[in-house]
Image (tube, rainbow, N blue to C red):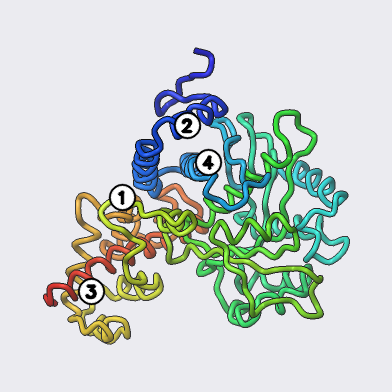
Amino acid sequence: MSCVRTSMNGLCLHQLVSRMLREDYQRRDPGQYHRMRSRTLELLTGVFPASNTLQQMQIAAHVLELYREQLPIAGTYTDFSAVRTQERQREYEPGDLPYLHRFLEASLARSDWQSELIAAGEHHALLEDIAAQDPGSIVVLCNSSGIPLGFSAGLRLHALTLPLLDRYAPAHRELLGELAGSLYSLPAEAADTLFILLAAVDTEQPYYQPEELGAMLLQSWLVYTSGGLRTIVATADNQLNLLLPLLGFQEQIQSRPKQAAPTGLIVWDLDFRQVTFEVWVQRVFQLAVQAPEAVLAEEPQSLDWKDVKQIVQHLYKDALLEEIPLVQRLGLAGEYVRQQVQHILTDKQPPYPLTELEQSLLRESYLQKNYRKSQLAEAFHMSRTTFYRHSRLAFIHLGHVLTRVLRDIDLHGDR
């Protein structure tokens, strides 16, 4: 059949036909439809952590499309059905820059949302500086030939990038409030907050409506941040201000602009530093779906990844472990903490949501200690920036595992 094609993962159905069949199934047998949809979500969230970026983007698109009608509004930015296998999200490459400037120029002519915060006439210069100083914060949406279709760009906030905000978006201090001051001394490798500043799509290509590409860019934000980042967006766009809170973004009331910033701007953030993808799905769609091995939404607050990192860094020093404030609050012996972490990092099957890659990365870095960080990044075929991002995500997932372990300790009284 022409509406069915094969892929590496099996059979794929045309998006329009798929939607029609789902709607028909829901009308004929709503109970079974909802049970099957819940089972689909359970399977997808189970494989999400170990999937590559393209697969994660497709999983996110599929989940958002499956539950789209549960959004109170279904605006143009929420049509997630257009993501296809041949379109992909990737990191910025130097050859992309002429395309991005063209998209940006067309967007500025329409006075799109990203022109609100940046000083007049500075948008192209900002894009140049981001590409030169923080290229990892540029996400490019491209077709099967690698030609860009759209992009979003921002700055991962730390001591070296904050001066760029001072130059191009002087109102940021007022928008970010107390957060801005603490970031001026933060080293680049510890950066975990992304401030989205620019976004544009190719309105001249014939295959997509601009809104479809906008939906794909919105997904790219969600997928990019699900790797353990906090994303901040400042916008006066009415559609975005309606949609962002429905997708889990929280308004920063204390940072409402007063005088220095343009009027009408609202600051939103989505924090994936302590939340996994399936927990975000459950919160946004208010679902009661069990994730593999646990209902993470019902767990106590996961351990902060920085506390987890401190434990792993001192893993072979029981006395130092017992001096860590978190360990003292829990009343645990250093030896017991060390044994639990060693077991998690050496287990043949890493406990969910820790992936095999993350387990291996932490084991090589902190248990075996045979290589420097730069050598490990090369061994894992990663840039230093990507290596640190995966390391932070590994600590976040290890924190979820330790949370379950410590909860069991409280239940059984065995320390």
Mark 3, secondary structure of its residue: loop
Report, in whole angstroms, how far the alpha carbon at label 2 lies from the one at label 4.
11 Å
Which kind of residue does numbered mark 2 sit on?
Answer: Arg
The image quadrant that residue 303 belongs to is bottom left
Q: Is residue 140 above or below residue 114?
A: above
Which x, y percent locates residue 177? 65, 80
Binning the other alpha carbons within 10 Å of mark 4 as few (below 14), some (14 to 19) or many (20 upward) gives some
User: Tags 1 and 4 in contact by the CB under 8 Å rule?
Assistant: no
Q: Which comes sooner in the sequence, label 3 or label 2?
A: 2
Report, in whole angstroms, how far the alpha carbon at label 3 lies from the one at label 2.
54 Å
Which kind of residue does numbered mark 1 sit on?
Answer: Glu
Closer to the camera in the image, 247 or 413: 247
User: Tags 4 and 3 in contact by the CB under 8 Å rule?
Assistant: no
| Residue displayed at 57% across by 36% down | 81
Number of on-image labels: 4
> What residue sits right under mark 1 in the picture?
356
